[in-house]
Amino acid sequence: IVAICGYPPRTALPVAIGLSQIGEFSFIVGQAALQHNLMPAEGMQVLVASAMVSITLNPLLFRSIDRIEAGPRGVPWLWKLLSARYEKRCASLNDAGRERVADGKQPIAIIAGYGPVGRVVDAMLRDAKVETVIVDMNVETVRGREKSGRAAIYGDVTQQAILADAGIARASHLIVTLPSLEGAVNFVITAKELNPDVKVIMRTRYLAEGDALRAAGAEHITFEEGETGVALARHVLERRGVDEATMTKLLRAIRMTWKMDPAPKASPNGVKQASSVPS
């Protein structure tokens, strides 16, 4: 249903997996069936057992979504069928955006996601005279950008074709403002293959994702989990009257322990230099 509505398989798969487990409503239906003699008592036992199995398997399916997607992707006619409405929708929406990207000559910053964080990043970059291209899955967002005469691409930013439409070949920065991105590691690898010089700046939820993203080529990662911890710690330290110098030292130690900042760069004489990225 999601694919028929014009969304990519990458969006349809999580929806399908999310609906694949037997939820609470099934027990209500089963109880009604028992009351109306539409199902034997043994049927409820089968229903409960099936629910336990499906709920157990559900998180494993979510963890395997990349491998699940690889199945239909490896069958050209099936992938084309699943993507047909999405590709048609993209083609009709992205004509103007592709033209604006193609007409530009200066390096651009691609911003994936145009929620509150994406809008702030876009506004600050434009104030700094940096040309931006928005990639978003919200049709109205893309149409609104087009009406204002600015470049926007509709689609799943993890898809190579969408990155190409957004101008990845001449992008200086690729900024992911989405709170979560399925297949983030493969996405970074793909972006680097299309443009080895692009600087990938990621937003992600968990500190545990950092090493894999850095290994894939992400230059800077902002961790929601870590930044929340640092902000709460700062608030407590301020309330306790800790001086600014001590507080800064403690919080920097936390950031280093959690690998929240880029590793210090070595100077020509071999001495490590502090990162220029602000805390």
Image (cartoon, rainbow, N blue to C red):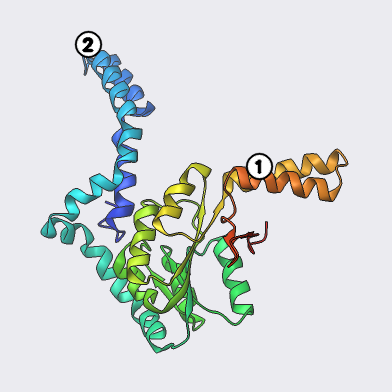
Q: Residues within 10 Å of mark 1 (few under 14, many from 20)?
A: some
Of residues 218 and 272, the one nearer the viewer is 272
Quarter of the C terminus within the rendering: bottom right
Name the residue: 40% across, 82% down. 101
Q: Amino acid at mark 2?
A: Glu
Q: Position of residue 144 (x, y in %)?
A: 49, 74
Pointer 1 residue: 229
Q: Quadrant of residue 277?
A: bottom right
Nearest to viewer (mark 2 / mark 1): 1
* Position of residue 246 in the picture relative to residue 39 (left or right): right
Residue 78 is situated, as x and y percent measured from the top left of the image, at 14, 56
Q: Residues within 10 Å of mark 2 (few under 14, many from 20)?
A: few
Observer-nearest residue: 243 or 165?
243
Mark 2 vs mark 1: which is more N-terminal? 2
Q: Secondary structure at mark 1?
A: helix
Name the element at disc 2: helix
The residue singled out by tag 2 in the image is 42
| Residue occupying the point 29% across, 36% down | 20
Q: Is residue 166 visible?
A: no
Residue that extends furthest to the top in the rendered view of this protein: 41
- 162 w.r.t. 101: above or below: above
Q: In this view, which residue lies farthest toward the front?
A: 269
Residue 233: x, y in percent?
Answer: 73, 41
Mark 1: which amino acid?
A: Gly
Rounded to the nearest angstrom, the CA distance separating label 2 from label 1 is 50 Å
Eyeballing the image, is 202 above or below 15?
below
Which residue is pictured at 26% across the width and 51% down the height?
1
- Residue 209 in the image: above or below residue 130: above
Left or right: residue 23 compared with residue 238: left
